[in-house]
Amino acid sequence: MQNKKILVVEDEASIRDMLRFALERAEFQVSVAQDVPSGRLRIAEARPDLILLDWMLPGVSGVEYARELKSGATTKDIPIIMVTARAEEEDTVRGLNIGCDDYIAKPFSFPELIARAQAVLRRSLPGGEEERMAVAGLQIDAASQRVTAQGEPVRLGPTEYRLLHFFMSHPERVYTREQVLDRVWGQNVYVEERTVDVHIRRLRKALQPYGYDNMIQTVRGTGYRFSEKI
């Protein structure tokens, strides 16, 4: 991740300085902006690989700016992590629904922030996938689209593979069925939400012989989560 460019859009000078310090220690190239107009200027000067965007900004809010970035032809592919004091579930869902790639609530630890930034950057590599991901012996090789469990091959259909890749790329996060549909099937495809449940059952069935089915967890009243924790 060395030399990756990160733009921090944050109106509080003390937080901007701390973020710059932490990110530069992690060997990122960092530029900063205090509001949306200066953020636009920084992007015009040098396209960043990732944007850390505060929700509460003067004038144009971070949510409005994220929507603008995701609808722009030259900026839609820049990943965004929303950084905010708004930690309610509905705020998280709103941030993810407008296209943000991750969401981190203040206060946060810098190691967590760096880890999230690195994860988002890996997912944005050419092809959009990390080469390999492994969790507790369950591994995906994105280049060959093979899945193994403790070294044994796991046979998955194409939709179940995409589901597993999505969940392993976004551990410990709860996603609604609608969000899973958008991320796995695509926003321009009409599929009923109950279709997600069908493919989740198929994925669990394929993972069950290896003891990994309980990593695909149902969160009652919300959706699904991928987690090692029971």
Image (cartoon, rainbow, N blue to C red):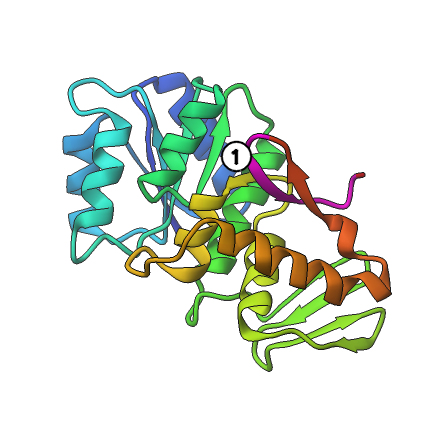
> Could you tell me if residue 3 is visible in this image?
no
Residue range in magenta is 221-229
Vertical relation: 8 (above or below) 76: above
User: Which residue appears at 16% of the width and 51% of the height?
Assistant: 72
Q: Who is closer to the viewer here, 24 or 144?
A: 144
Q: Residues within 10 Å of mark 1 (few under 14, many from 20)?
A: some
Residue, disc 1: 22
Q: Secondary structure at mark 1?
A: helix
Q: Who is closer to the viewer here, 115 or 20?
A: 115
Q: Quadrant of residue 10?
A: top left
Vertical relation: 57 (above or below) 123: above
Q: Where does the image place residue 96, in percent across and percent down from the top left?
A: 40, 39
Vertical relation: 43 (above or below) 212: above
Locate residue 102 relative to residue 56 in the image: left or right: right
Q: Where does the image place residue 199, in percent across and percent down from the top left?
A: 58, 60
- Disc 1 residue type? Ala
User: Which residue appears at 83% of the width and 75% of the height?
Assistant: 151
> Could you tell me if residue 75 is visible in this image?
yes
Q: Who is closer to the viewer here, 146 or 84?
A: 146
Q: Is residue 48 magenta?
A: no
User: Which residue appears at 85% of the width and 69% of the height?
Assistant: 150
Point out the image quarter for the C terminus: top right
Q: Is residue 226 magenta?
A: yes
Locate residue 21 relative to residue 54 in the image: left or right: right
